[in-house]
Amino acid sequence: MRTQPVVLVHGLGSSFEHGWRAPGWVDLLTDAGRPVIPVDLLGHGTADAPHDPAAYSRLETSIERVLPLYVTETVDAIGFSLGALLLLRIAARTPERFGRLVLIGVGSNAFRTDDAHGALAEAFERGGDPEDVQTRLFVHLARSAGNDALAMAACMRRPTDDFTPADAALVTCPTLVIIGDQDFAGPPDPLVDALPDVQLVVLKGIDHFRTPSEFDCIDAALEFVEAVPPAL
């Protein structure tokens, strides 16, 4: 039986409370006897919300600061979207810090270098309701979580290095990738092919935003980290 704490890392525009507690993840992990380590990424939730993109250049530190002090103390980690991408970068540098890793809502986008981030940042800066459906959903998500639109824009404009399949190959801890077959982050194959120790769950008919609240996603993730609550 696994007893390691579980780090939960939300996606862009969300927060720990909005992304994990509201859909029931925290209660389920607690019922399974697993301590939960919350993360609010810079610009989100209860964290500071600077408007300077340079402040977000090491966004991973929002996660690293809550990890156990000693590298020999492992945690399991579950991340969605931006949270999953950040966990990938940390695990590529220090895979020994993680027992098991669950990456939700990521796939080939882990290696993309297109200008989608700039377009989304502009939408946050303009305010209102963008015409593009996907962009509008991100904007509405951030609003519903109570996040600062200009902080979201700064987060999207942060300087960042490319992440390559060679980097992903350094993530040696057991990893589960969960993605909907309607998710713009896909297809999952380039990421799955690059990870050395990986399982894949594809959710039929599910898009990016629905994934973390889907029962099949929650069940697969909890089973993978061996945190299934006892039967009533």
Image (cartoon, rainbow, N blue to C red):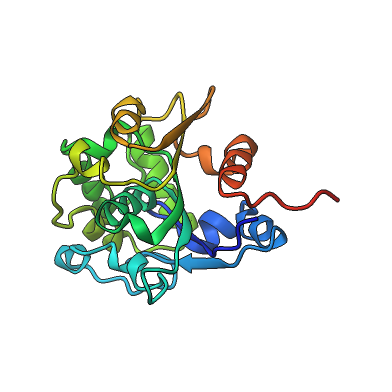
Give x and y (percent) for residue 72.
40, 68
Label tally: 0
Q: Residue at x 38, y 48 (%)?
A: 84
Query: Is 35 drawn above or below residue 129 in the view shown?
Result: below
In the picture provided, is 210 more to the left or to the right than 32?
Answer: left
In the picture provided, is 48 more to the left or to the right than 210?
Answer: left
Q: Nearer the viewer, residue 59 or 13?
A: 59
Q: Residue at x 52, y 38 (%)?
A: 211
Q: Residue at x 32, y 49 (%)?
A: 88
Q: Residue at x 34, y 46 (%)?
A: 172
In the picture provided, is 2 more to the left or to the right than 107?
Answer: right
Give x and y (percent) for residue 27.
68, 60
Q: Nearer the viewer, residue 226 or 83?
A: 226
Query: Is 163 drawn above or below residue 189 in the view shown?
Result: below
Rendered image quadrant of residue 28? bottom right
In the picture provided, is 145 more to the left or to the right than 24?
Answer: left
Give x and y (percent) for residue 193.
31, 28
Give x and y (percent) for residue 199.
46, 33
Rendered image quadrant of residue 213? top right
Q: Nearer the viewer, residue 218 or 43?
A: 218
Q: Nearer the viewer, residue 200 or 151?
A: 200
Give the position of the N terminus as an image quadrant. Answer: bottom right
